[in-house]
Image (spheres, rainbow, N blue to C red):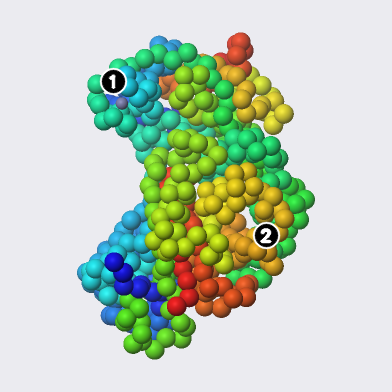
Amino acid sequence: MSYEEIVIVGAAESELIGVVPDVSATGLAIGSALRALDDAGLKPTDVDGIAGTLHVSELALQLGIKPRYADGTNVGGCSYMLHVRHAVAALRSGMADVVVIMHGESGKSRVGSPPMAMDMATASGQFERPYGIAGTFSMFTIPTMAYLHKYGLDETALAHVSVAQSKWAAQQPRALRQKVLSVDDVMESKMISWPFRVLECCPVTDGGGSLVLTTAKRAADMDLKYKPVVVAGTGELVEGAGSSFMEDLTSFRAFRESSAEAFRTADMSVSDIDHLMIYDAYAHVPLYGLEDLGFVGRGEASDFIKGGATSPGGSLPMNTNGGGLMYTHTGMYGMFALQEAVRQLRGTSPAQVEGVKTSFVQGVGGMFAAAGAVVLRTQ
Amino acid sequence: MTGKLLPIPTPETRTYWEKTALGELWMPKCETDGWIFPPRFHCPTCGSTEFCWKQLSGRGRIASFIITHRAGAGYQGEVPYFIILVDLDEGPRLVGNLYGVPVEPSAIHVGMPVEVFFELREGIHLPQWRPIGSKVTG
Ligand SMILES: [Zn+2]
């Protein structure tokens, strides 16, 4: 059977990203939602479906609407990829006509953000957290040495990820880290969690971003500034507790399976993809992602990046906003990866790649706990 | 009070923590599917709740590691320190800290054999790790 085409008609980030001490997390979400709606020529009253990782009832109140569809799925930073996937199903089945997916997080300034609670009765609370896990930088990163060891790589494999992405970030006026980096710059930066230096770890920032989705049929009757971006395929997988519980420390099942489903539902393969976003909270994640998604063979991601394939002018432009490492990382970065993919498909990215017709966006949630994938294309 | 985080045992994990208090490492094992870790209500492979607890040797090899330069709760006086993943000889994997070697990358490697000891932390005995034959206890 053929499904109705679902499209993104509005996309925007909050006016300010980075350090935004006078806007709450909810304010960042709502501010970006109003901008995304304006981008689509719509008003809040046109919206009958919402999704977000903040309380959806609070988002509805703040937006001033009473949605008949609400999705509060929260599996970490890739939640927005899952929201896109669920919105596609909702729009196709008539559960909603216009869905707004909202992200707002005061990761740096902690304005209007609840304290981060830790449940010491969970699997992670009992068997990981007691061992001096200071933050994600000392747990999300922990499988990396197994990966480097398996393929005979050294620490510079991580540095090259940051170097490649810094070349994109230098073209992005809104990126937090805009300097073009050398391997030495990265290797000499402050040690956080060996083998990870600070320039191989995401910064912590404030920001928001929203997407507006509807059916292609409805979009055809709208007066749009930009051509709709088609959600061609999606996938998700919730794997479980986190990095120490991975079946294989050198490959992430949720990347493999969510991406395979996204490719299958889009009826595409790696050779059809012009542009790639892989959620990079830390520099090892794109190495895992390139291999688990099938863009390169096992153990080949480092040479691929080092050889310039993902850098400006390369065969597979990746993380063209500079990634979570350089652009911004509010905590749940996935929305910003989706925003850059939409910009590339609209032709409006400050680091625009010529002729992008397809983009693959891969998110990770928690510390190798869940994943969501979205394939986007021009209409 | 050390300020270090304490696990909160649940009915599923109570035996694990009761055995560590005796200086032993035990985990549930399904007759058909092998070790079940983290301990759960049922065997996630076959669904059986009819499994029994078995003792492990407490020996394994380092599967991966980091050296954190930022302290977790209660670890402020110990930075930098190792956080390691240990693949036990019997198969399951545990997280822990490594003691008994200098805290530097050259002193540790993937595949390095280690053995368990138990750190008493406010009434809970946590599995911790040292090189085989080392006598350190923290
Ligand atoms: Zn079983």
Q: Amino acid at mark 2?
A: Ala
Q: Quadrant of the C terminus of chain A?
A: bottom left
Dot 1 corresponds to which residue?
B51
Percent x, y of residue A48: 26, 73
Q: Residues within 10 Å of mark 1 (few under 14, many from 20)?
A: some
Q: Is residue A341 above or below residue A181?
A: below
Disc 2 to disc 1, how far (Cα)? 51 Å
Image coordinates of residue A41 in percent, x first then y, are 38, 85
Residue drawn at (43%, 63%) of the image: A267
Q: Residue at x 59, y 66 (%)?
A: A321
Q: Tell me which chain the residue with mark 2 is part of.
A: A
Residue at the limit of the structure toward the front, as seen here: A1
Q: Which mark is residue A160?
A: none
Q: Residue B58: give x, y in percent of width and height.
A: 49, 16
Quarter of the N terminus of chain A within the rendering: bottom left
As helix, strand or loop, the secondary structure at mark 1 comes to: loop
Residue B34 lies in what quarter of the image?
top left
Image quarter where ligand 1 lies: top left
Identified at 45% across, 59% down, the residue is A263
Nearer to us in this view, B37 or A27? B37
Residue at figure coordinates x 43%, y 19% from the top left = B125
Left/right of residue A96 with respect to residue A120 in the rendered view: left
In front: label 2 or label 1? 2
Q: Nearer the viewer, residue B72 or B105?
A: B105
Q: Chain of mark 1?
A: B
The residue identified by callout 2 is A309
Please, what is the three-letter code of the amino acid marked with disc 1? Phe
Both labels 2 and 1 in a single chain? no
Q: Nearer the viewer, residue A65 or B52?
A: B52
Q: Secondary structure at mark 2?
A: loop
